[in-house]
Amino acid sequence: MKKIFTLSKPSAFFIAFLCAISFGFGQVVAWEFNGNNGDEVTVNATTINANLNMSTLSRGSGINPTTLNDAFSSNDFTLNGTQANALTNNDYLQFQVSTQTGYQVSLSTLDVTIRRSNTGSNAYIWRYSTDGVNFNNIGTPISYTVNAGNGTAQAQINLSAIAALQNVQFGTTITFRLYAWGATNVGGTFAIGRLAGNDLSIGGVVSVAPPCPTTTTWNGATWSAGVPTITTNAIINGNYNTTANGNITACSLTVNAGFTLNVTNNSFVQINNNVTNSGNVTVQTSGSFVQNANTGTFTLNGAGTSSVIKQTAVKQNWYYYTYWSSPVVNETVDGAFPDTDTDRRFEFNASNYLDLDGNDIDDNANDWQLVAGSSQLIPGKGYAATSSPFGLYPGTDIATFDGALNTGNITTPIVYNAANLNSWNFIGNPYPSALDFNAFYSANSSLVDGVAYFWSQSLPPQNSNPGNEVQNFNQNDYATWTTGSGGAAGASGFTPTQYVPSGQGFFVVGNANGNATFTNAMRSTGNNTQFFRSTNTSQANKLWVNLTSDNGVFNQILVAYVDGATNGFDGLSYDAPRNLTADVASTLYTTIEGNPKKYVIQGKNPNSLTLDEVIPLGFNTSINVPTVYTLSISQFEGDFMTNNPIYLKDNVLNTIHNLSTSAYNFTSQVGEFESRFEIVFQPETLSIGENDLNANSLTIIELNDDNVKFTVSNNFDIKSVAILDLLGRTLYQFEGQSNSEVYNLSNLSNTVYIAKVELSNGQVITKRAIKRN
């Protein structure tokens, strides 16, 4: 990116004094909607206690925003629904309450003003959860049949009697949901707001949290006072394995001398405050060690040791690079990479990177620099290293980082040069746990753009690849993540998520000079399984398309119809350019009208996704030997993508191919083809006769008892119906003799399937559907 590589504790009196402090009962969070349009997607609280985290009001996936002045308004509730329907269909409003580090909250009251239209929901209930999964009713359902233009203040709800909502400390988030039902029209509205003053408020008290009030000790077999919680001091006085003995969540942690705490793969330890380690703490590749409080410390006592062990995916050869970042304090280059040749360990000097010709290659060839073996790895900084040339390959690479585990605020410099096409900065996750890149971007958006590039090498170096050396690696090996639209895979085929694994380095684009800050609030106890090496609810509609070839080409693009995006350029959080230089062998990309860049990820306005939508795909190739290219659907999300066939239009051959049922193969001359391909959602341009039907003429309705009804229009009869999975395997084969047939699909799980229907006129209609029950 970018040149490509060559071959002390407070006194007891003070604690007691703090524990006595409180801030009195009153409103701790509230919303006033005066001046709102009503159709805002989310609304932040207008009043909030200084020691609470910002709370946002939002909707469940089952309902939609609608305009209503001075309110937060919704419609499209389940028609004539019940409470059970509301729960199943996610017909709710939601907000959350959580404290900042060192504080606790006790909730006492809930006040709300509600307004409905004549056909809007006429019953509701509040529910709460302290884990975001398991919800409990607050009282019984409330009937609300009044149609008051300015809303009605509801009877105050008492929260003080709910034990789970008292003395809730940092690390626990309280989620409130207001479920509503009974609407008689999809346009019927149910809203909060309209009256003067706060329209929604929670009363309570926020106070300084006490220190860890209880202690439990692990003796190698059991806990002395029960499993630790976020309010418990946990002491390890016997060997502990998180796979065998369970995850640990505690207020503080002590590991005694002579004993080992092993944080195994896919498990975690989460500590609210301080860690004192006189024994040994080991964190495995996809294990997570999280400390919540930014003021919490990790202390090695005496002969105490701690380490983070990271194992890569399979490398094809020793010279395949991995992007690293140290999750511990004071580790050296030689300590982490002892078997790597000294001329294969690099750091990236962002200040030296200069790209005046806009080809994304350093003009002076001095951006990548060797790093001395005795140098300490700086937390938050990225490093690149190969494996030992004496290993067995294909094989994995293991790096061990020894030292006190990083915690708290960590800063890393960001360099910006307006002369560059992109101001690349090589940074890394500094923690022994996953890092939420979206949260990192939100806190540092004045310094970096909302896009991250991960090196996921799959291709060998070649002298035909652009770069400053005789042989250079392929830019297509970068996987991409955008905070607004999602991720797209590089040549390895791995698609990144918003969570950056521990020990992982990555590139960001700087937009100002300054120090970016990592904080403990960005850490996650899970999501630490995807390590890039040198190899629920209703979703937004997203489509991933792959370009491959019979000689090793791999490209992936993502088109995402997401809230906040337009069909123009929306910044790197939504629209990520493909990391390209001239003479890349072969590339697939999307374009934005009036913008010359080529995009690997493009965010688009959700309202523009209709059956008339057209997605242009650009393609270029410099391969001058006979090659068969393939375009295929990698994956898709969202109801529109699930329920409609996806077609590929080849404007050169004047053909349309159904990508939903099979991949498309083609050949090409060398060159740039910006308008050869298009993604479309209806095959109107095919030469169909007056009596032929398209997929919209076939309806598929799920009935009771696993029965599914298939109906075609225009008086044609169904001759046969084949049910296929997404891999094209036939699951059912039925015969038919009328225009409407019912078949039993009892052996079909709740999944997406393909119905291939042959009509009496010989035409075959293919359509995707989803079995929900």
Image (spheres, rainbow, N blue to C red):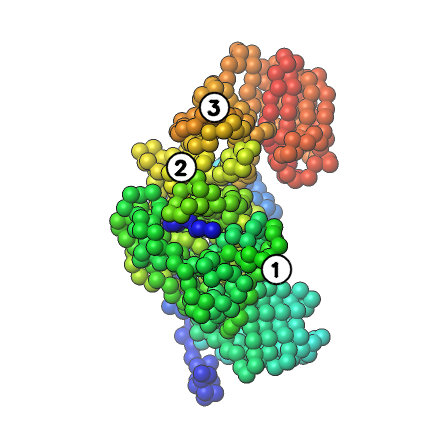
Outermost residue to the top:
690
Relative placement, left or right, of 565 versus 491 is left
Query: What residue sits right under mark 1 in the picture?
Result: 266
Q: What is the three-letter code of the residue carrying label 1?
A: Asn
Residue 349, x across and y down, in percent: 35, 58
Q: Earlier in the sequence, mark 2 or mark 1?
A: 1
Task: Residue 554: tell me if it is visible.
Answer: yes
Q: Which residue corresponds to the image point at 62% horizontal and 61% vertical from the top-left? A: 265
Q: Earlier in the sequence, mark 1 or mark 3?
A: 1
Q: Earlier in the sequence, mark 3 or mark 2?
A: 2
Residue 213 vs 184, above or below: the answer is below
| Disc on res. 583 | 2
Q: Which residue corresponds to the image point at 45% horizontal and 87% vertical from the top-left? A: 11
Q: What is the three-letter code of the residue carrying label 2?
A: Asp
Q: Quadrant of residue 400?
A: bottom right
Structural distance between the alpha carbons of marks 2 and 1: 41 Å
